[in-house]
């Protein structure tokens, strides 16, 4: 899950395809829910309403076969936490920061 422009250009699709991992994008009505949640977080509304929007969008992906959900924008993991979905929620910002630190320390 990410902002519409990230989904549209297939950023995660291209990266994961190199590892033979299929990425499932939210269907349009669920992508709208993701965007509403992101705007809510940007506005400082980090309560259960934003979490529910993202959890519902995530559950729709799981029903379509997702085995994990990428929190592909910095706003998403602010409200969508481990345990909100029955599959792993991967914080892309955290993963990028961790990779950067490993690279800097020569531990790739």
Image (tube, rainbow, N blue to C red):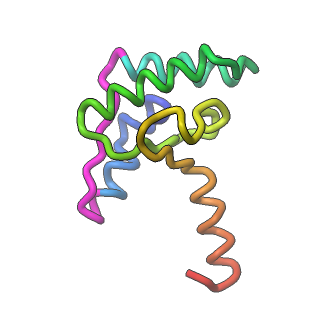
User: 98 and 51: which one is in front?
Assistant: 51
Span shown in magenta: 17-29
- Picture mark count: 0
Q: Residue at x 56, y 48 (%)?
A: 91
Residue 86: percent from left, percent from top? 42, 38
Q: Quadrant of the N terminus?
A: top left
Q: Residue at x 36, y 34 (%)?
A: 8
- Is 56 situated left or right of 73 in this image? left
In this rendering, the answer to whether 55 lies above or below 17 is above
Prevailing SS of the magenta stretch: loop
Q: Quadrant of the C terminus?
A: bottom right
Q: Residue at x 39, y 45 (%)?
A: 68
Q: Which quadrant of the figure has residue 58?
A: top left
In this rendering, the answer to whether 10 lies above or below 97 is above
Residue 57: percent from left, percent from top? 41, 24
- Is 87 situated left or right of 27 in this image? right
User: 69 and 73: which one is in front?
Assistant: 69
Q: Which quadrant of the figure has residue 96?
A: bottom right
Residue 41: percent from left, percent from top? 67, 23
- Is 6 situated left or right of 49 in this image? left
In this rendering, the answer to whether 21 lies above or below 39 is below
Q: Residue at x 63, y 17 (%)?
A: 48
- Is 3 situated left or right of 80 in this image? left
Residue 64: percent from left, percent from top? 24, 33
């Amino acid at each position: 899950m990410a902002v519409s422009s990230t989904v549209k250009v297939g950023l995660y699709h291209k990266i994961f395809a190199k590892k033979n991992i299929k990425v499932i994008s939210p269907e349009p009505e669920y992508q709208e829910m993701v965007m509403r949640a992101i705007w809510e977080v940007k506005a400082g509304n980090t309560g259960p309403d934003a979490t529910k929007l993202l959890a519902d969008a995530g559950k729709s992906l799981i029903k379509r076969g997702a085995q994990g959900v990428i929190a592909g924008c910095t706003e998403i993991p602010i409200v969508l936490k481990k345990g909100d979905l029955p599959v792993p929620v991967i914080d892309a910002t955290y993963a990028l920061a961790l990779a950067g630190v490993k690279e800097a320390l020569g531990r790739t």
